[in-house]
Structures are given as structure tokens and as C-alpha cells.
Amino acid sequence: MPKLFGTALCGLVLAASLAFAAPVLADDILDRGVGSEWSSLDPHVNFDAAAGWIMMDAYEGLVTFGPTGDIRPGAAESWDASADGKTYTFHLRDGLKWSNGDPLTAQDYLAGFLRTLNPATATEKGYYFYSVIRVKGAKDLAEGTTTDPATLGITAPDARTIVVEMLSPAPHILDIMGAFQAPPLHGPSFAANGAAGFIDPAKVVSNGAYVIKEVVPQSHVYLEANPNYWDAANVKIKKVKYHVTEDVSTELKRYRAGEIDITYDIPLNQTEALLAEIPAEVYLYGSTQVDYYSFNLTKEPFKNIDLRRALSLAIDRETLENKIVKAGAPPVMNYAGGFDPSYDGPSIAEAALTQAERETLAQELYAKAGYGPDNPLQISIATTVAEDVTRRAQGVALMWKKVLGVEATVNASERKAWLDLFYTADWDVFGDNLVGDFAGAETYLAYMRPSAEPGYNWVKPEYDAAMDVAANIPDKPNRNKALAAAEKILLDDYIFAPLSHAPTRHLIKPNVKGFGKSVAGYDNSQFLSFE
Amino acid sequence: MLRFTLKRLIDGAITLAALVTLTFFVMRLAPGGPFSKSRKVSAEVLAIIEKKYHLDEPIPQQFARYVWGLLHLDFGPSTRFRDYDVGALLASGLPYSLTIGFWAVVVATLIGVSLGIAGALRRNSATDYLAGIVGVVGIAIPIFVIGPLFQVIFALKLGWLPVGGWNDGLRSLILPVLVLSLPNIAYISRITRTSMIEVMRENYVRTARAKGLGAARTIRSHALKGALLPVIAYLGPATAAIITGSVLIETIFAVPGIGRHFVDAALNRDYPLVMGVTVVYGGLLIVFNIGTDLMRGYLDPRVRNGG
């Protein structure tokens, strides 16, 4: 009897094991990691890059971005600019539809712009249209000075035409006419459901290659191909699931188990091992984030340009990024270049020297500024607590100590505290970064304009003047030349030490094809396919 | 008994009120705010956003507004997750946290008590040693080690279970429940064993045996009730701790519960969400403690009579 019982138990365990051991089949769903949960699925409100992927799949702007970030016709099949570059006219495709079959018109895009600029929407995205490009009347609407939509320089003269009038020419207008910045608005749905109409799958009306079918907070968003999309025939993957993958090492295991096809990130300490093990699946490439160390110009030691220059030159950027931080970030000696291949900008003046020569020069400048072994400079570096960021700070502190004898400490705080610390000016060196609004030099250079009051307390009328010159040139090649001249003025003042470009890090299954390395990072699922 | 219950409930309400007040004010002492951004948002736009969340009001007024809302079960809007108010986020996450917590308690109690009794009845036997080993392992190895280890063994090597997420029905539940219950299996088996050994030496158990009752019957109807008293005392706070302690589990196994909000909300300075999670967790702790007291009062008259 006990024997029989034993056999039965063994059989049961075996059966259970077999049931559980059902292999994870390669299914037809594209599973993508998004890191932390999206802050909003409301396309006019969401500001997260990761949630941006969901937005790019679910909505389409006047333009769209190909796998390598190339600008392609989206809802607009063509556009033309006026001779002065201040007016752009977009021509919509014929027969565009919303996911519910309603016709999609130019008025819907206008409604989208108006909602983004409406203070009641409480979104930060309005600045794309009054700051990144300067659309007539946008600022007054955003700040609530007027509520009259007729004052806006965007109009829809007919169902297939959108006209954007700007105060100054901006060839980069196309970079912000995608779904992330400028999605349309389905008026009837919004009137009936309010913002819930963007979140509740039963109510969502969208115009992208996919429609949202399921939303589970902290878990996933599931989308299916939109049959009413104008290019639906070319959408190869019909189902996409975005998973919240907060814990990066769990995400890696889920990738290995076949639960995730494209990861959000790669654990920092695993990058080297994975590059050796599965090099073809490791995607490391640039993003629109530049990392740099800002000097506090309101504090006495940093008012001296010799000292700022010495600190910048003493950093061996190659060693720092490749041997110490090891996050795959390409080191840089410029600020606004490297994002847009058509921009040929300057580097810091000493970029052509060897690191040894730079260090000798740094020592001379340090002594000239009045510091030495008996009188070392004592400063702190303000950073967040993220691992790569603190590693970078410790590496820089070490180099400053070794080359100059500077006594630098690392002051790491939580991200939100670090953000607010910047505006208190109670810091010496700020472990800074900037994420560009698009992959072009202008977004970075415009941010540094003293008149834009970024908080650096940098006084430089020449820079503002040079940027004003650039801002009035309608054609891109000449504008880029003017921007490069401005960048030279910026770099020559050493108000910060540029260090590296933050990398984009993904693991991508070999059977997923069509993933380009887009710096802007839109990566629409519609251009991917399974092999 | 009624007076006892009432007193415990009033104590609980006072504790919760103190918790709410303290959290509300202490949270705002931390530097940084919910809308701290890497780019300076124009003052006008920031003012509009802050007004929407009533962050422009003086703090006492914000507190009054919050408490008033709370009394109507309105937890306010989340500043981090713009699509939901805090009540909706809690309602969406709580079932997952409770499911895992509930099964972890059940598993921990069943296995823990069985191992403990077996160990106590056959001291120094193989079962006793097994219970001892489970105890040491469960208590000594932290969740953040055993969790990933189990993921590697059961998901990556054997392929029996998913690594994480909540896409696989029951199979998604097994690993988190197992890992969450492990330390508690250890504690419960230790407690049961010790108290069982003690109870077996008690006069009333010896009397029961002396009057001719069988061993099994003695354990079932006499010893067990006494032996489980410390287990129940442990179980109340432990249940709350298991449900709330799943913060790590939820992160490691990507479970969409509310535990993950605990840390994330604080880091993002999402004041209403921090408050919401604190109130729910605090409330659960208080309720389970009261439940334990009542249970113990029921099992042991000395407790309810203030002995």
C-alpha cells in the first residue's frame, strides 16, 4: 500500500512538472521592456521617453521617424516651407482615418496643438511650440494670457492642410512634428470621455499603426495593429506588449527566458560579459543625452577661467568612460555635436593634444590660478545616486586628485533632491546632463543661452548674439555653420566640462529584424518584423 | 470582550491618525518636489500645474484638504502617474499584493506548523533536522538573494516557471509566493517546535494521556490549541509584514502590486501616493494586530481579561 501511494505521488509530481515545463513558445507578440511605469498614456501629457514608444505606436504625427531616426512623411504626405522659413504648410494624405473609422482631418491636428497649449491640460509639452520653435501666439495661450484659439499661428484652412506660422525660421520644426510632440486629438472622444479616453482601452481612439487594447498599471500595455491605419498593409508585427521592467536584472532574466524580445536596458555590470557572450544581441549606441560637469560661476574659485580650464583638461575622458564607468558611453570633448551627422561643430581647443599634454597644461593653469600642494582646491561634486553617475564622479575626483592635487568629494543625493539642489546654487561642481528635444545641435545650444536663464549665471552677450544670428537663418547647412560658431564661444569659456554621451542600451532577440540605431530613440514597432 | 474590541479599535484609529499626520509633514521636509524637472519649466506653467494639485496652498490647508478627502475615501490624484488617482492605483495593485500575501501566509503556516510539530514530536529525527535546515536557510538568506537564485533555477535552467510578470496565471504566482513564504516557514516552524515541546510537558497533556487518550487525539484536541497560541501571536503582525514586505518580491518578480509604489512614490515625491500607500499599509498592520489580539483573547481568556 505505501508503495502504491509512493508511485502515485511520483506520477503526480511528474505530471505537474510536465505541465509547468511547457516550453515558452516563440509567439507572435513583440514583447518590449519600458523600464519604470509610464507616467501617462495621454499623448499630450506624457513626457517619458519610454512611454514615448507606446505613443509612437498608438499615434502618428504629421511626420514620423524611420528606424534610424530619418524623418518620413507621416499623416502628412508632403510639406513646403516659405522662402523666409517662417511658415510651413503640411498636406495630409487622402482618406486618413481614426482607429474607429472616423475621418482624420487637419482640424484634429489643430485640436491637438490647442490642447497641448491649453493651461487646463497642465502639460509641460507646450514649450515645444513656444520655445523649441516659436509659433505665433503659442506663448500667450500656454501662459493663459489669452484663451482665443484664433490668436494661434497654426491654422487648418481645409480638411487636408495645416499651416504653421512662426516668429523666426526653424528648420528643426520637422523634428517636433512627430507623435511624441504633436499628436492629433479626436474631438468627440475627448468631449465624451475627457482624459480617460486615452487610457481606457474600450474608449481609446487613436491614429497610429497600433491601438491600445489592454492597460494594467505596473504591468503592461498591450496593443494590436490598427486596421484603419493608412499603411496597415506594411505593419508586419500585429501584436505588441510593453512590459514594466523596473528591475534591470529581472529584465535580463526575462529576456533570457524568452519573455522579453527587446529590453529597456542592460545591467551595468553585465554589459561586458554580454558583449562577449551574445555580441549580436547587444545594442549600444548614442542617445540625445549629453553628460557634462558644470562649474558654479557664482562661487569665487570658479570665476577664474584658468581653474575651470584646468579642471576640464585634467579629466582623461577615455579612461573615465572605458575603464571606470564602463557603461558604454562614448567620451566627448564637444557639447552639441555628434547627434546630427549634418552638424560639424567644434571641440574644446585642446582636443587635438594628447592627454599627457593636456594634463601638463592643466597643472600650469592650476598653479596660475593660485593653487598648489600647500593650497589645494577643495570642492564637492553633486550627483544622483545612480551607479554609473557616482562611478563617473569618483573617477573624476580621482583624476583631479592625481593630476592637480584637488581634494574633491562626491555628494550623491536622490534625483529629485539633486534637481532642486541645482537651483539653490549651493554646489561647486554639478554632475549635469541634458536630454535634447531632438537629435540636433540647436536644442543643446539654445538651452545654454544666457537669455534662456538655464541657471548657470553665465553672462555672455556675444553668445546670445551669435545664437540670434543662427536663429534667423532658414536653411539648415548655413544655420549649422552659424551654430558651430556659437558653440565655439560657449566651449572657449569652459563653464562646463563636456564628458560623454549617455548610451542607449538594449538587448534584442536575433529574430527581431529592422531595429535601427536611432539617436532620437523613437523605434516604432511598425518598422520591425519577426524572422 | 466587546469593551476589549472597542478599546483596540479606538487605539488603532488614534495610531492611524498619528501616522497620517506624521507622514504628511515629514515627507515635505525632504528636498525636491513632485515637479522638479531637469529643465526649468516657465514659472507660469509651473504655477498652473501646481495649482491643479493644490501645491500652491499653505501646507496646513493642504493637510486639511487631504484629511477631508481621506474621510471620504478620496486619496487624491497621483502626481507621478497622471492617468490615475491614488485610489485607482491602490485598487488596481492591492489584489495582486493581497493574493501573493495570502498564499504566502497559507503556505508558510501549513508547512511551518507541520514541520514544527513533526520536529517536536520526533526530536533529532531526520524531519527535525530538515526543519532546522529550512529554518537556517530561510532566515539567513535574504529575499534578494534567494529570489534571483530561484529565478535562475526554476525559470532559466528548468524552464518550469516564468521569471516574472503576471502573464501566466497560476504559474506566475508560484515563485513569488514560495520566496515570500520561505523566511516565515522558518520562523513558524521554530516557534511551533519550541512551544509544542513545552506544551507536551504540561500537566494537562500528561493528564490527558494518563486517562487513556491516544497520542494523536491528545495532540489534536489538547496540545495543539496551546501550542499554536504563540504562532497566532506571531501570525498577526507577520501577515501584515508579509503583505507589506512584498516590496522586494514585487520588484524582483515584476508583480504589479502596490509594494513597488512604496519606494518609487517616495523617490518621485508623489506625496498623495506615498500617503495612500502608507495609510493602506498602516491600516492593514493595525487591523491584523487587532485581529490577532481578538484571536488570542478568544483562545486565551487571560488576554481579554487584561491578565
Image (tube, rainbow, N blue to C red):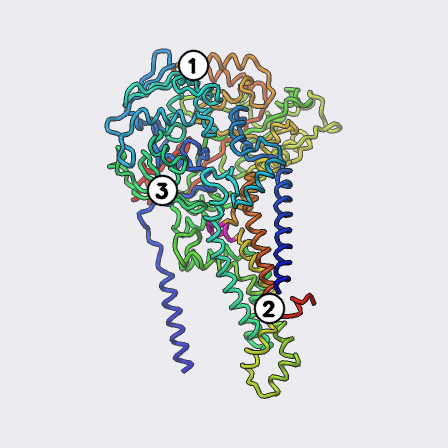
Pinpoint residue A67: horizontal percent, then vertical percent: 35, 33
Residue corresponding to mark 1: A167
Q: Toward the viewer: B149 or A401? A: B149
Q: Toward the viewer: A472 or A218? A: A218
Residue corresponding to mark 3: A201
Q: Which residues are magenta?
A: B249-257
Q: Is residue A6 found left or right of B26 in the rendered image? A: left
Q: Secondary structure at mark 2?
A: helix
Asked if residue B255 lies in the magenta stretch, the reply is: yes
Residue corresponding to mark 2: B298
In the rendered image, the vertical position of residue A337 relative to residue A21, given as above or below: above
Amino acid type at mark 3: Pro
Q: Is residue A65 visible?
A: no
Front label number (3 vs 1): 3
Q: Is residue A79 visible?
A: yes
Mark 3 or mark 1: whose residue is earlier in sequence: 1
